[in-house]
Image (tube, helix red, strand yellow):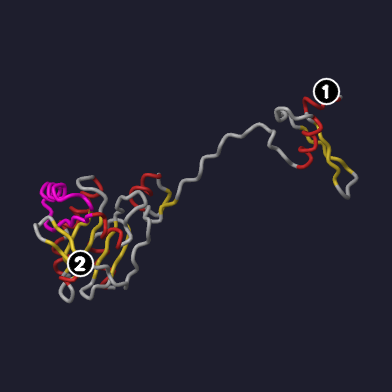
Amino acid sequence: MGRFARRLRIGTSFLPGTGLSAVRIDCSPRRAGSSFREWFHDFHKGDTSHSRPRAPVAPAPRRCEVCAGVTPPSCYTRSHSMAEELLPVGAQAPEFDASTTDGGRVSLAHFRGKKSVLLMFYPKDDTPGCTRQMCTARDERDDFEAAGVRRFGVNPGNMDSHRKFADKYMLDFPLIVDEGSRIAAAYGVLKENGGVARATYLIDPDGRIAYAAAGAHGADEVLGAVRG
């Protein structure tokens, strides 16, 4: 019985208040170097570290709040994993001064009391998602101009890359060269890996944020939120 118990590892536990005993059998091998007495003691204490290891369980997919559903890691890390939160509606928009593809410089202060400003942050020049984002803003020119909104794409790429992108798709608004990603950091869209997340901001003539959302958003949604 002793050798049989060593192989099958039979243990018993007394069930209080019933007068009965429960028999437990463990066929897995003991821990290397452990005696039967040590195993039996661990077994009754609930220590199962000697048991056969189980296959790892795959983690549940992360839910992307922007895409409103379960998405692959690429969606989360490429578009929505931001080191900081977006600035809230009603907050004072951070000032900036930067070069643009039209050969000049632009500052937020220049539009104070005159125009609203649309800032469209995008990850990279001439990529599918960014091309759709910028071309949508190009095609909605009349809607934005009727509302007194000036459009700008914002990305830390260099001037040459920006101009090639703008010329290729005939973008009718300037792209801002965000040197050192300073504007992205100020607006909470700089990702932990140093990239820039896609995001949309509308700044009113008083210099306050009227609309802020992760991702790309068209004129209907952006202007609709302002009109109420």
Asked if the residues shown at circle 1 and circle 2 are in contact, with their CB atoms under 8 angstroms apart, the answer is no
**Local SS, label 2:** strand
Q: Nearer the viewer, residue 153 or 177?
A: 177
Kind of element beneath mark 1: helix
Front-lying residue, 76 or 111? 111
- Residue at the image position 37 percent from the left and 48 percent from the top: 77
Mark 2: which amino acid? Val
Q: Is residue 178 magenta?
A: yes
- Specify whether 28 is left or right of 225: right
Residue placed furthest toward the left:
103
Q: Position of residue 58 (x, y in %)?
A: 51, 40
> Is the residue 28 above or below the residue 110 in the image?
above
Assess whether residue 168 is covered by the magenta stretch.
Answer: yes
Residue found 34% across the figure and 68% down from its top: 88
Percent position of residue 99, x then y: 15, 58
Residue in the foreground of this view, choosing between 159 and 9: 159
**Cα separation between marks 1 and 2:** 83 Å
> Which stretch appears magenta?
156-179
**Tag 1 residue:** 3
Rendered location of residue 192, percent (x, y):
37, 52
The amino acid type of the residue labelled 1 equals Arg
Q: Which residue is mark 2?
A: 117
Sequence-wise, the earlier of marks 1 and 2 is 1
**Residue at image coords 29%, 54%:** 198
Using the image, tell me which numbered label, if any, was put on residue 192: none
Estimate how packed mark 2 is, as few (under 14), some (14 to 19) or many (20 or more) residues with alpha carbons within 10 Å.
many
- At label 1, counting other C-alpha atoms closer than 10 Å, the crowd grade (few under 14, some 14-19, many 20 or more) is few
Q: Quadrant of the N terminus?
A: top right
176 vs 146: above or below:
above
